[in-house]
């Protein structure tokens, strides 16, 4: 067996920042430390943080007054921020800066009198937060068919934004449909789909042509991980989305000589290496690293945490690390 190890893969800069922030916050403040939604969409990461004393909540009502609360990488709406403040909760904002960019774009478009069409997936934490920024001025579309159902009056000023973790091809088709239906619609000056999502999709698109099967490390509730598996299948390859080596079924590999391994933006590198080791042990796999693009993006820790750390030594994060020395944002 030959294993192609895709790069870039795994943690992106936003996930790196959020995970390190939670690790450092637990060291500084101690448990329990509350987190609004999962810090990132990855089951093993969430389980490990639960063991350290992180408590993941879905409503502010679950957080005691005066407690420490971290907002996840996916961001929150202004209503959540107001409710936290009213309850006397001390917050640390670990929202990915690329998600914050979309929030600010929505706010600016709404101020300028635009109605906004958000391309994304209903119920996703990021989408909920973005729509909460401009309630009454934004509508969600998930498919080209949804575009056909939009009923804006003639003369309406329209703008579009996208969820950061979409399939590039899927988003492109929906944006094209929007532009065909509403020729005067405007968009952000810079693409909303994050660099890491695009890079990982590009790697799968190119490298899957050399493989018989694709393993994607990532959880089923991770939008960007799901897109990687879908992209592999669209290329005609068998693909499996797994949380870690414990999910691998050896019968998958019958008749497959070349396996591509990649990881979604919230999947830690040690799980990738666990899968590689298992295939080396079971099949004597030859492993070849294949890089299609380098990443050198880093995001600083949240302001609230940086201020707190002036009185405490920094603690190395348990899950931060890149598969390639040249790719510190190991998505």
Image: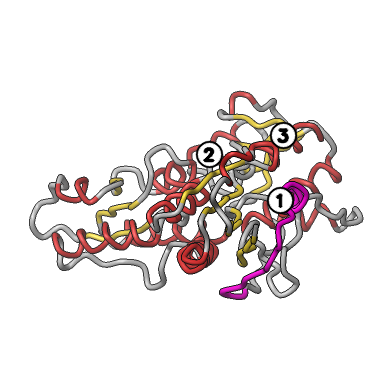
Q: In the image, what residue occupies the spot 69% across and 28% down? A: 65
Q: Which label sits in the foreground, 2 or 3?
A: 2
* First along the sequence among labels 1 and 3: 3
Few, some or many C-alpha atoms within 10 Å of disc 1 (few <14, some 14-19, many ≥20)? Answer: few
Q: Which label sits in the foreground, 1 or 3?
A: 1
Q: Residue 47 bears which disc, if any?
A: 3
Does residue 238 appear left or right of residue 293 in this picture? left
Res. 81 image quadrant: top right
Q: Which label sits in the foreground, 1 or 2?
A: 1
Residue placed under numbered mark 1 in the picture: 283
Residue placed under numbered mark 2 in the picture: 220
Look at the image and say whether residue 227 sits in the magenta stretch. Answer: no
Does residue 162 appear left or right of residue 224 in this picture? left
Mark 2 to mark 3 CA distance (whole Å)? 15 Å
* First along the sequence among labels 2 and 3: 3
Magenta part of the chain: 272-294
Look at the numbered discs 2 and 3 and tell me whether their residues touch, using CB distance below 8 Å.
no
Camera-side residue of 78 and 19: 19
* First along the sequence among labels 1 and 2: 2
Q: In the image, what residue occupies the spot 59% across and 36% down? A: 37
Q: Secondary structure at mark 2?
A: loop
Q: In the image, what residue occupies the spot 85% across and 45% down? A: 28
Instruction: Give the total number of marks visible in the rendering.
Output: 3
- Residue 13 is at least partly visible in this image: no
């Amino acid at each position: 067996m030959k294993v192609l190890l895709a790069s870039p893969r795994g943690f992106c800069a936003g996930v790196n920042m959020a995970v390190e922030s939670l690790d450092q916050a637990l060291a500084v403040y101690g448990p329990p430390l509350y987190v609004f939604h999962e810090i990132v969409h990855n089951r093993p990461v969430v389980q490990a943080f639960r063991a350290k004393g992180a408590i993941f909540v879905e409503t502010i009502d679950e957080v005691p007054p005066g407690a420490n609360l971290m907002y996840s990488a996916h961001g929150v709406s202004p209503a959540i921020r107001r409710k936290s403040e009213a309850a006397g909760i001390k917050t640390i904002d670990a929202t990915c800066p690329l998600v914050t960019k979309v929030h600010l774009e929505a706010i600016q478009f709404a101020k300028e009198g635009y109605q906004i069409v958000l391309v994304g997936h209903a119920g996703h934490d990021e989408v909920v937060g973005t729509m909460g920024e401009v309630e009454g001025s934004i509508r969600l579309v998930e498919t080209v068919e949804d575009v056909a159902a939009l009923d804006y009056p003639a003369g309406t000023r329209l703008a579009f934004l996208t969820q950061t973790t979409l399939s590039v091809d899927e988003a492109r088709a929906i944006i094209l449909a929007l532009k065909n239906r509403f020729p005067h619609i405007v968009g952000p000056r810079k693409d909303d789909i994050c660099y890491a999502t695009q890079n990982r999709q590009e790697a799968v698109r190119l490298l899957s042509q050399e493989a018989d099967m694709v393993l994607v490390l990532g959880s089923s509730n991770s939008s960007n991980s799901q897109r990687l598996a879908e992209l592999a299948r669209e290329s005609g390859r068998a693909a499996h989305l797994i949380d870690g080596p414990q999910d691998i079924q050896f019968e998958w590999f019958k008749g497959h000589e070349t396996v591509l391994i990649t990881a979604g933006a919230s999947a830690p590198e040690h799980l990738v290496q666990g899968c590689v080791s298992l295939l080396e042990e079971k099949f004597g796999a030859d492993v070849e690293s294949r890089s299609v693009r380098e990443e050198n993006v880093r995001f600083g820790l949240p302001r609230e945490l940086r201020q707190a750390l002036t009185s405490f030594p920094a603690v190395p994060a348990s899950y931060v690390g890149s598969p390639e020395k040249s790719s510190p944002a190991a998505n």
